[in-house]
Image: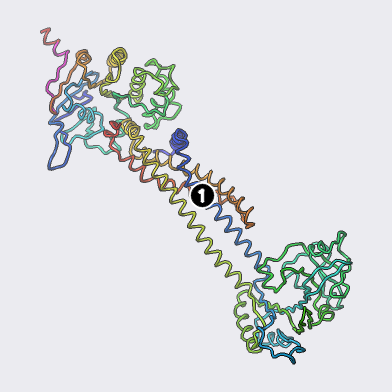
Amino acid sequence: MSDSVVAIEGVEKQYGTAETPVCVLKGVDLQIPRGDFAAVVGASGSGKTTLMNILGCLDRPTRGTYRLEGEDVSRLSDAALSRVRNRRIGFVFQSFNLIAQLTVVENVEVPLFYARVPRRERRRRVEALLEAVGLSHRLHHHPTQLSGGECQRVAVARALVNEPVLLLADEPTGNLDSHNGAEVMKLFHLLHGQGRTIVLVTHNPEIAAALPRVIEMRDGSILRDHAKTTVAAAGGA
Amino acid sequence: MQISALPEVFVLGLSNLRRNMLRSLLTMLGMIFGVGSVIAMLSVGAGARHAILERIGQLGIQNIIVNSVKPPQEKKSQGMEENWIDRYGLTFDDEAMLREVCPTIERVFPVNLVRKPVWFGSSRVDASVLGVTPEHLEMFRLRVGRGRAFTELDAQSDAKVCVVRKSLVRELGVLRDPLGLTLRIGGYSFEVIGVLEDEQFESHTRKALALDDRAHEVYVPYSTSMRTFGIATFVQRAGSEERSVVELDQLIVMAASPDLVYTTARILSAALARAHPRKDYEIVIPLELLEQSEKTQAVFNVVMVLIAAISLVVGGIGIANIMLATITERTREIGVRRALGATRSDITVQFLTETAAIGLIGGIFGCAFGFAVLRILVAFTGWTAIVEPHYFAISLVISAGVAVLSGIYPARRAARLDPITSLRYE
């Protein structure tokens, strides 16, 4: 499957010392094709956060390989991983993680800054993107002046600004009320509709149910990988 | 990190510093004191060096000054010694002898020094009247402001002319142009032909030249002085009378070159020691005074350097301390930046730029502070201070350097933070 954005084989992750290792991931295999929109669900401690960290190149697997668009990134150096995160992955966090000292525009600019995009070009792209998420009236506000929903939209814009191949969202609606949560989910569905590849961690069964694919984790392995299209096809047959 | 991104990182650093204005200022305080003392140190040091050169250089580093001094009183038997004339000091024979035994002597200038009252009308001022050779004034950098110095011709004709200080004229209450004025010196009339610019000798210099602190100097030709005042002195005090004869009050011996000063002085001292067992002379070597002063100055400089260094080190520790606190405070921001693609060196550069900004701004304030302190110092102590523009450049480089050095450890620590843990840091 060469068109897989993510191809993980036998990934294990251990923490702790060599004598008393704590196994968080126990041999995970996972393929995420381009344009997929998957939810990762599971109880806390099931390893979904660790899986997301590895998918986001924030962490390296102890064993196994991780191919991002066919390139093995499981043994890259710290600096190379930084580059991968910068150019190919977009993060959306539960608590937004906007930098309080920077304005909306500056926050969205951060990934472009580390990608060495010239200032003027940066401004142009950021402003266009913020307009697309409906925040062109908030460009020079600080995050503290925005509502939670607005903050998360800024964060989504920031995740998209470098045109990543993989968008990772860790409970993006966790800190939002239902209305704003629904708005943000609408945005994700819209992005999926545009062909983006999205992996989203959620505790909310309603949100998970609305996604085309649900990956259920338990005790460091994938318990069930459940794609609706397949189900629908099976049902149709 | 590309160089082109540095200005932007710098601006970001500045805005971070502005956000915590008070804290940044407190952090800079150590730098400000450090740089202030560097500026003060350099300027006072340069000023002092200049002053020493000026002060002792005035005596001429090639010169050796030999003064006649009254020997320590021997126990006098009463009665018959009452009328004795006290004869001491250098003699004309000494002068000839010195020239002969010491080939490294270039020239010898005699000085006849008498203390006489100077009268103008009914005003009187005590003066040290120095009978000197025409070269003397120039040798001691005494600049004639008005009129002229005396010449060989004045000396040969025993002209009763004198060169005086402006302050003497002022004290005599003369308001009109002093040139051509006739003063009564020790009962003789002298015409004022020149007025010296009123730069008083420093106390060191006065001491070296055996000048009385309370009297004014009046310069007359040597030959005139010898002819008029002679070598004998009679001083009457209540109940006693002092009679003394000193042939040569002072000899200024000029060595052939500055390298030969110490050699000459040694020969001189040996020759005089044999001729004068009574120790009725003293030898002053300006070069030695200069070197001594420079040694004292060097001690002072070391102290100043230490003070500056300690302040800078303390300032650097303060910066490191605050940066460590800042990094703890901004752990989450660091995590976010790392997740968004910042490499370790990006983070290092970001924090180093911030410390450099602290150092630079602290340095600028420090320059202002140092300059202000210097002004106050100079106003209160009367020291000479020389401020040169490059001191400020040196100070800024030092302060930025110290700041960057003290920022290295915190910045590296920030860069080593694990992105995952820092993202979850509360």
Q: Chain of mark 1?
A: B
Q: Is residue B189 left or right of residue B341?
A: right
- Residue at 74% from the left image edge and 83% from the top image edge: B246
Q: Nearer the viewer, residue B423 or A229?
A: B423
Q: Is residue A42 above or below residue B252?
A: above
Image coordinates for residue B43, horizontal then vertical, percent: 58, 55
Q: Is residue B243 left or right of residue B50?
A: right
Q: Is residue A123 at least partly visible in the picture?
A: yes
Is A227 magenta? The answer is: yes
Q: Secondary structure at mark 1?
A: helix
Amino acid tagged 1: Val
Q: Nearer the viewer, residue B80 or B261?
A: B80
Image coordinates for residue B188, horizontal then vertical, percent: 87, 75
Quadrant showing the C terminus of chain B: top left
Image coordinates for residue B338, horizontal then vertical, percent: 32, 33
Q: Is residue B123 left or right of residue B135?
A: right
Q: Is residue B96 above or below residue A161?
A: below
- In the picture of the structure, the residue carrying the numbered disc 1 is B35
Of all residues shown, which one is farthest toward the top? A236
Q: Quadrant of residue B228?
A: bottom right
Q: Is residue A165 above or below residue B31?
A: above
Q: Is residue A194 at least partly visible in the picture?
A: no
Quadrant showing the N terminus of chain B: top left
Q: Which residues are magenta?
A: A220-231
Q: Nearer the viewer, residue A89 or B161?
A: B161
Image coordinates for residue B75, horizontal then vertical, percent: 66, 88
Q: How many marks?
A: 1
Is B162 magenta? The answer is: no
- Residue at 62% from the left image edge and 77% from the top image edge: B261
**Protein image colouring:** rainbow
